[in-house]
Amino acid sequence: MRVSLSRRRIMQGSAGALALGAMAQPTAAATALAPIRLYLNENPYGPSDRAKQAMQGALGDGWMYDHEGASQLRRLIAAREGLKPENVFICEGSTEILKIAGMIFGGDGRDVVAGMPTFTALPQYASRRGGQIRWVDLNDEMQLDLPAMDSKVTDRTGVVYICNPNNPTGRVVDPDHLRAFIEAVSQRSLVLVDEAYIDVVDDPERMAMTDQVKLGRNVLIARTFSKIHGLAGLRIGYGLARPDIIRRLEELRVSIPNRMGLKAAIASYQDTEFLTYSRKMVRGAVAYTCAFFDKMKLRYAPSQANFVMFDTGRSGAEFGTYLREKNILVNPTFEPYDSWCRVSMGRMEDMETFTAATREFYKRT
Ligand SMILES: Cc1ncc(COP(=O)(O)O)c(C=O)c1O
């Protein structure tokens, strides 16, 4: 049931750390069979054939560092985005960008402004480095509340974290509102826009904030090869920003990207056929899953990402445990939405197994 979420405030919650430790893990009995992984927003169609070929061709090269591969990927990304290589930071997954940015801009007694709930890598890391997190509840549509976030920015704020689409809700903010927000807020703080799921949204060109980098604003975009490219295990991500911001990230990078990951990313980046296919499959799975929720009269947040958050109407943790016993992993750990659960889009047969198990859950309880 695709309800208007504005009809009522779903749940007021106190801002606090998310219960990430409670993330679903398979029970001992279930590990005999590989579990159905619908809890980490991966893309089961990856790596693409071209990425696999590129990795196979490089098997014997593992003894070499790959500075040239990183430069090649940097040039490819810069060319496609209409930026310069100095605007691009290549790293070991976008988590590295989020953590470095959290440390540089959000640590040492400064403030980080972030939605609640959201992807916690940046705020959590900043908090561990002595930063204060100003959590801002989502609005009634389960979107990041840009005016409320703006109002939390002070002269102590080092970074404002905008995850768009937001994880775990899959909701996007209006791109024109976001552009106006960046224009105003970036004069007071760095705005980090996490575009991990940008390739899945309805209109990626309009939603992507690369024009804000071109305008020279105080903005950093984080992207990843872990999602639409299906390369999560190969750990490649990239950032887009002004050269002075990129230099600060470079100073504190923890490692250099791995050679195999770079080979796969370079091949995948140019494999438009695979990307189109992945997008089609993900969006098909979202449509199927939402139609199922409609049929079951379960509320869900209309998602533009490769996962859907829905209201189980019970304890989300109880639902998660039930599915885990059926060898299906989902993620119900997003405070304050205790009755909600996030399900990632897997292959269609996995989504069918998920919907059958969910139907069973409501029959039994
Ligand atoms: C919004 C968001 N940003 C970043 C990441 C991390 O991606 P990576 O594998 O590139 O570190 C994730 C992973 O789930 C995510 O959901």
Image: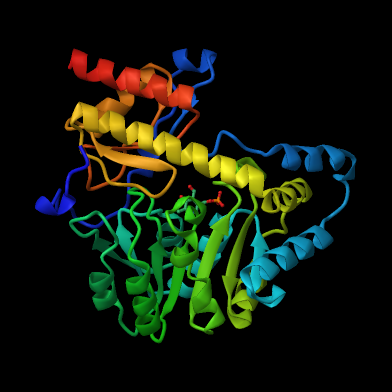
Look at the picture and state if 346 lies above or below 304: above
- Residue at coordinates 54% horizontally, 84% vertically from top-left? 216
Q: Please say which color scheme the image uses.
A: rainbow
- Residue at coordinates 39% horizontally, 38% vertically from top-left? 286
In the picture, which quadrant includes the C terminus? top left
- Residue at coordinates 61% horizontally, 82% vertically from top-left? 244
Residue 158: image location, x then y, percent: 42, 77
State how many labels appear: 0
Look at the picture and state if 286 lies above or below 14: above
- Residue at coordinates 29% horizontally, 62% vertically from top-left? 144
Q: Is residue 58 left or right of residue 258?
A: right
Q: Is residue 100 left or right of residue 141?
A: right
Look at the picture and state if 360 lies above or below 244: above
Residue 15: image location, x then y, percent: 24, 57
In the picture, which quadrant includes the N terminus? top left
Residue 263: image location, x then y, percent: 77, 49
Residue 107 visible to an observer of this rendering? no
Q: Is residue 302 left or right of residue 29?
A: left
Could you say which is closer to the camera, residue 12 or residue 351?
351
Could you say which is closer to the camera, residue 116 or residue 269?
269
Could you say which is closer to the camera, residue 205 or residue 169?
205
Quadrant of the image occupied by residue 334:
top left
Residue 51 visible to an observer of this rendering? yes
Residue 78: image location, x then y, percent: 68, 70
Look at the picture and state if 213 lies above or below 27: below
